[in-house]
Amino acid sequence: MKKTFALAALATLALAGTAEARDQIRIVGSSTVFPFSSAVAEQFGQKTSFPSPVVESTGTGGGMKLFCAGVGTEHPDLTGASRQIKKSEFADCQANGVTDIVQLRIGKDGIAFASSKSGPDLNVTRAQLFLALAKQVPVKGKLVDNPNKNWSDIDRGLPDEEIEVLGPPPTSGTRDAWVELVMTEGCKELDYFKSHSTDVCGAMREDGAFIEAGENDNLIVQKLEANPVAFGIFGFSFLDQNSDKLQGARIEGVAPTFDTITDGSYEASRPLFLYVKKAHVGVIPGISEYLSELTSENALGDYGYLVEKGLIPLPPEDRDTLRAAATALTPFSM
Amino acid sequence: MTERPPALPAGPAGTQTAGAQGKSPALTSRHMSDASRARLKKRYAAEARFRFYGVAAITLALAMLVLLIGSIAWRGAGALVETWVSFDVYVDPAVVSADDPANPQTNYRKLVYEGFYQQFTPALSRSDQRVAGSLISSGADRFLRNMVVSDPALIGTTVRLRTPAGDDIDQMRKGRIDRSLPQAERKITDRQLALYDQLVADGDIGLGFNSVLFTSTDSNEPELAGIFGALIGSLMTLGVCLVCAVPVGVAAAIYLEEFAPKNRITDFIEVNINNLAAVPSIVFGLLGLTVFLQFFGLPRSAPLVGGLVLALMTLPTVIIASRAAIKSVPPSIRDAALGLGASRLQAVFHHVLPLAMPGMLTGSIIGMAHALGETAPLLMVGMVAFITSVPSSLTDAATILPVQIYLWADRPERMFIERTSAAIMVLLLFLVVMNSAAILLRKKFERRW
């Protein structure tokens, strides 16, 4: 009898849940944007009388899929992305009735190529990184499996140490960005690819010199401490937090620092985006207030709390444009 | 081996002859011969070796366990204490309205920092104020707000505020950031150190019990992050799982074991239940996503959906354990009950079930403990999320302990490492309690036949 009652109560609750309109903002998307969107969510919950938004870290691609699934309270309102929305995702959105999407470029993030403080001080070009990490590299006009064992095999000026790099798996946005910003760019600088297709440039080597260390950047940091000759690829905020243990390698002569990423001289940096579903603004309470908190000087200004969390701020004039965009909410098209 | 002593008889026939003659030297010599001793020694050696392997296996397993728990405890123990800063704050009635102290627009932040800067003599320059501000947690205003909201009489008085220190200061206090390194290589500047030392000299900063960890919810600032929200979420999720999985599982087990005819259909069902128990948990998450979220339209991230998914996952475990428990009740109990005129239903519910109960409880508790530690299926139904409010109903957004651990493990701030380990310790504690309960129940009520 008690059990029947409990099950009945459960069923009632379930029905009540579906009938109830959502009063909380729901945010999904990139794990790189997650620390920033959740920091704003926390502040927003503290400062306003709106309930704190729920932020899920689903990855850029997973977030887009949820975001584009449709309009209605069961679908998220905002999604973070560590790259721009793809044409296919945009088309998917349109097909599901999510026609008005607002794109906000909230800041930048750098990708560090770093090693333990006791490791070698490396200064590499993107072409050299490509030669060290690509699955196939051109040797005497032919594409062969990567023969480089030591850094010095690529260039005599580089240290005579084994190539050993820990990096994110293909599902990660950091990996996508690394391939796009470093591998593909590096490969374009080689003579061979001036006359051949660059399609193979994105493939990382699988012979043990590049190790997929999982999505957890903290794990890579710990492994680097244990192995001084190894390098790791991860978000700049992890380098920043572990500045007493790690050093960032210079890429094209520029070390990854707050300033070099801000002014764009450090090449491995990428923009971060937040996409807004315009149809939900005004339906789900608090979206415009959340956006004004996010774009406030207090959050992403030069001394904002997001900057403390590792976000690289936009130049002041871009911040003004961003604020205007967050108020006007002009849908964007591709 | 090959050289047998001449006295040794060839076989049973020989033994018989020896016995018939009334003597047994042949038998003695067979077991006392050198070859026999060698064989015996070899057999003992084999046993000793096997025992050694067993002990070695247990030692290795224990060593791994000690290593695991040791490393977690080593890292997590630090999170039981936190660095606290105490200072006087004047609760200015011009800033805090006596009618509505909880108003979110009230600038408690200003009061906190003004109070904190007064702590230093000589007075701080503007640039030093920035540096000093980083010594206390950026959420210090929440502590003042809570104090004032719970006791509005404090408005207009000066209160002693106790707030966590900033995360880097805490890590340095605990020795996890080396202050002897050159300034460029550590997160803390020399100026911060100087102000910190001033606070230490005045006795305004020190370690204290980390109550934040157990009373607050998730946060982006490690010094403000706690497991309370996740704990409540875990209890709700587990409650739903218990209410759904145990009655259904036990009823299914009773029917299959006591009432169902033995035929191909029940065989087929049995095979499938066993298969379900071995299905990877993420599959149940995908099932939950399509059935509960997309088809029934239940809310995302809700403990209700999480509990239902976990119930699906634990159901096979409960059914299998309950069936085994019912099977172990000897048929004589049923026969005696039926012989005295009880109906089948009475025989089962009055006689078999009470005897099978300890086994069923053990199975259910182990199933629940398994569900408590699960994250993968909940990823799919949106429970892996940053949530700062404590869930108050089964349809509110919530997260659970293992998910909280997973989320913290991914954070860059160093203080989250010990927070993560501390959360793991709490989770392990729950698992130990649940599993000990299972063992105790079994010991207390078990009857052997």
Image: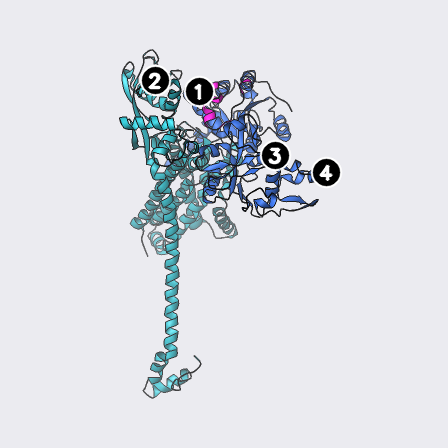
Chain colours: A blue, B cyan
Q: Of the numbered discs in the image, which one, if any, rests on residue B214?
A: none
Going by the image, does A293 lie left or right of B335? right
Q: Quadrant of the N terminus of chain A?
A: top left
Mark 1 or mark 2, which is nearer to you?
2
Residue at the top extreme of this rendering: B94
Q: Where is mark 3, residue-wise?
A: A180
Q: Is residue B318 above or below residue A238?
A: below
- Is residue B347 something one can see in this rendering? no
Q: Secondary structure at mark 2?
A: helix
Q: Looking at the picture, how far across and down is residue A138, in whole percent?
A: 67, 44
Q: Of the numbered discs in the image, which one, if any, rests on residue A195?
A: 4
Circles 1, 2 touching at the beta carbon (< 8 Å): no
How many other residues sit within 10 Å of disc 2, few (<14), some (14-19) or many (≥20)? some
Foreground residue among A161 and B358: A161
Mark 4 or mark 3, which is nearer to you?
4
Label 1 and label 2: CA atoms lie apart by: 28 Å
Residue lying at 65% horizontally and 38% vertically, measured from the top left: A187
Chain under callout 3: A
Circles 4, 1 touching at the beta carbon (< 8 Å): no
Foreground residue among A102 and B199: B199
Q: Looking at the picture, how far across and down is residue A118, in whole percent?
A: 46, 41
Q: Where is mark 1, residue-wise?
A: A50
Taking the magenta stretch, the answer to whether it contains residue B289 is no
Q: Where is mark 2, residue-wise?
A: B114
- Is residue A243 something one can see in this rendering? yes
Chain under callout 1: A
